[in-house]
Amino acid sequence: MRKVLVGVATLVVAQVFPQTGWMPLSREVERPFSALMYRTGSTIHTAIRPYRSSEILALDPKDTLRLPSALAALDKWAGVRNGRAFRWGPLVDAQAIYSSDTSSSYIGHRVGGGVWAERDIGAKLTFHLDGQVWNERFPTYLDTLARATQMSAGEGYAYGDAPNYTHYDWNAYVSWDPGKYFNFTLGRGKNFFGEGYRSLLLSDEATSYPFLKITTTVWHIKYVNLFTVMNDIRGADGNPADFNRKYTSMHYLSWNASKRLNVALFEAVVWSQGDSLFPRGFDMNYLNPIIFYRPVEYSIGSPDNALIGGALNVRVGKHTLIYSQVMLDEFLMKEVRAGNGWYGNKQAAQLGVVARDAFKVPGLQLRLEWNLVRPFMYTHSDTRQNYAHMGQPLAHPYGSNFQELIGQVEWSHGRWLHSIRTSTAWLGSDTTFSNGNNIFRPEDDRLGSASGHRDFGYRIGNAVGYSLFHGELRTGYLLDANTGTRIEASYLFRQRTGEGDPQLAHVFRLGLVCHFRERHPEQEVRYVLN
């Protein structure tokens, strides 16, 4: 009788306290549910991440896909799998790193710890908090990046002196469902729009930021209003009180037009807080949740940075998705047709295909993706209003003036994961003048002529072109599916050719890897922040 009562109580608690919050923005945590999410006929808007926990768990109501923790006591304590209103768990990284490149070889490390916790209040309200802090000696190419940008890629400001850095990141939110069709989430974190490994609209490459997100789901449509507070860290020397505030307002409209076709529209506007002479703060004109930003921008005579984009995604067969994105900053059809490399043709495009359970092999995922970003994309004449946060691009980590080809093979079976990821990019870099590579330089820095600035002849790979290859092999054994924590070994090969002396790097990692946040191993120094 006691066992029956406990079972009934657990069932009641699970029904009273459904998980109304959000999944971690991590492909490793999402992986067990991936095939179900993307199957033909799924109604989930898979390009809007992170996902609602309730939507994902509904795919597998008995929670049989996600493996329990290898530490049985952890599930018992954390209450993740038994419907408790309070859930928590540890976040642990402990890796040894061996790095060898053209100039040096050394042993580095990555040691970090933290915790995540959630609390449901009734059936409509969820509180979440997570945080991690790391001490790390980076491989040379990431150390160079930290020196140039003052940041650890996607994980916060890099405090300390080379070669050892300390950095931290934290997320928190309160999620409220006032009714059937709406969700309001106020917090600090990241968002991602797109089906690709990269996103040219909004990615998780930059560190976390405060936001208010309003999600409306009606019929086959999901509509997201995202309002954020971001920072320009230049000249602040790491002091948050001296960061220059900037704001963004974004819309993402996703329509599942059929069981196989998804169409989406995206728009964003970025503006700075102004200065002591012209203080501005958050512009209330951009709070309107339903209108396009361009008319608003013109109506108030603002010089803000407005961007617009779209996506078209088609499911083929049972488990294959063909996806695409287009992002426009400025666009004149006359100049595009002329093909003369007008600097104002600021566009980005993505085309990719991903197959899950490929060739009827459970857990096998194949991806091929091409990304192209024209020079000067994501820049602005007022660099405080560029498409970046905390010294990092909000879209692709390479910023602009490049094209990239990505190939991935991943196979998960049971607790094991084996993967091969490659990225080959062809990039252009600046000389004394801007050729559209550095999104923190204004457009007026471009090459001059006797009659003024040169307006034409800007193409991907100018002025100094080079190629960059990243190839990573990984194998790992899953310990905790709720945080994506694995015992993992990896090898990264990196080659840079075409500009100056060729650069080679070999990076070996071994240890405990927490994938609660996305890793960002493919990085390159594209600018130096002052």
Image: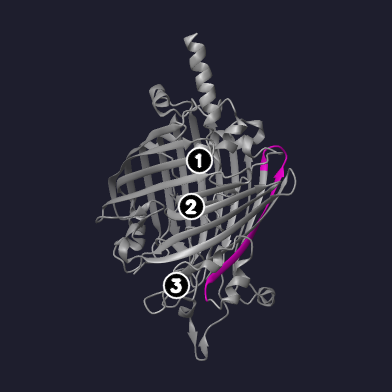
State which mark lies toward you, 2 or 1: 1
Pointer 3 residue: 280
For label 2, the crowd category at 10 Å Cα-Cα, with few meaning under 14, some 14 to 19 and many 20 or more, is: many
Task: State which quarter of the image contains the C terminus.
Answer: bottom left
Q: Residue furthest right?
A: 258
Q: Nearer the viewer, mark 3 or mark 2?
A: 3
Q: What is the span of residues highlighted in magenta in the rendered image? A: 303-320
The residue to which callout 1 is attached is: 125
Q: Give the quarter of the image for residue 46.
A: top right
Residue 204, which numbered label? 2
Tell me residue 100's x, y (percent).
Answer: 33, 48
Q: Nearer the viewer, residue 256 or 9?
A: 9
Amino acid type assigned to the residue bearing label 3 in the image: Arg
Q: Residue 307: within the magenta?
A: yes
Main secondary-structure element of the magenta-colored stretch: strand
> Where 193 falls versus 363 (above or below)?
below
